Image (tube, rainbow, N blue to C red):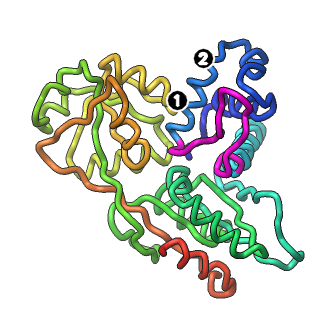
Amino acid sequence: MDSPSLRQLDIFAQMVAAGDASRCAADLGIGVGQLLADIAALELRLGYRLFEEPTTAARLTPAGRKTAQAMLQIAQDQDAAAVDPAPDADPPPLSKPSRLSEPASPTILLAAPAPVFGRLQESLSAFEAANEDVAIALDLHVHDARDAAAILAAGRADIAYFYALGDPEGLPSRYGWSEPLNLYVGASHPLARTDSVSRAALSVTPMIAFEQGGGMRRVVDAALAQGRAQMAAPALESDNMADILAALRDGAGCFAAFGPLARDLGRMEGIKRLALDMPLPAIDVRQAVGPGAADKPAVGALAEFLFL
């Protein structure tokens, strides 16, 4: 998860604290409809649901509880950076409330992009249920091989999932699965009426993208460059999915997505996936384990379990 906007963090935190949508909307001074739209945009960005039923009691899903911990850490990081910026100070992952039966019980540190965590969450819950003496701490800051290598080398994770275009050099890892990269425009956009879109057509089409410097932006930019799909200068750069959706439906440009986000965009009214006359590279999801994993049997067990 790229660091979400302060607005997203505030709305999510206020929703949890208020306990229901009406009270939260009143506290924030916005309408319930706007509140629910913001929550839905955040869930779309993450790739999974945060609340069981946000229109009534704001009960967090199991994934929502762990995400709340990770997002709390991000908020603390942002506050600390405002006081003393430290480029080397990657935050430690937050653990869920401990279920350890004794103090010496192992904790496994798992780092993964938020959408990958969404896919793994059922397996993680099953592993925890079968191994009650093991706790799993979650970090959602990792996106690509650079992130994964840094966090593993620093001992801040035992297992890291990351996005890659093939097998990265210098980081032993194994292939998990691939996610196609697709391009999307609004249904009224001229390219939406084209049976086959060429590179030349893309080159004069403005891009809609996540903000520069974020992990998802790096992954998408690398895949587009490898596929030689060059687009015009961005019409919008935002980490707010509500803004991205509005720009898409207004015909402002073309947006690249993969994984759960691409799946959900493909189901939305007013948005169309482009048919390209050239293939784009798929995004691989890979797993790497830390150098100290051999000393933690539970780490190896979880790494294998996630591949079952």
- For the point 14% across and 31% down, the residue is 201
The quarter of the displayed image where residue 92 is located: bottom right
Instruction: Characterize the magenta stretch by its predominant secondary structure.
Output: loop
Residue 285 in picture, x, y percent from top left: 42, 62
Residue 202 in picture, x, y percent from top left: 19, 33
Q: Residues within 10 Å of mark 1 (few under 14, many from 20)?
A: some
Q: Report if residue 52 lies within the magenta region.
A: yes
Closer-to-camera residue (144/57): 57
Which residue was labeled with disc 1? 240
Q: State the CA–CA distance, disc 1 to disc 2.
A: 17 Å
The quarter of the displayed image where residue 299 is located: bottom right
**Precedes in sequence: disc 1 or disc 2:** 2
Q: Report if residue 78 lies within the magenta region.
A: no
Labels 1 & 2 near each other (Cβ < 8 A): no
Residue 287 circle label = none
- Closer mark to the observer between disc 1 and disc 2: 2
Which residue was labeled with disc 2? 33
Q: Which residues are magenta?
A: 46-65
When the figure is inspected, residue 223 is found, relative to residue 17, above or below; the finding is below
- For the point 29% across and 43% down, the residue is 182
Residue 172 in picture, x, y percent from top left: 46, 77
Which amino acid, by three-letter code, is at mark 1? Asn
Position of 238 with respect to 109 (left or right) is left
- For the point 60% across and 82% down, the residue is 300
Which amino acid, by three-letter code, is at mark 2? Gly
Position of 103 with respect to 34 (left or right) is right
When the figure is inspected, residue 146 is found, relative to residue 107, above or below; the finding is above
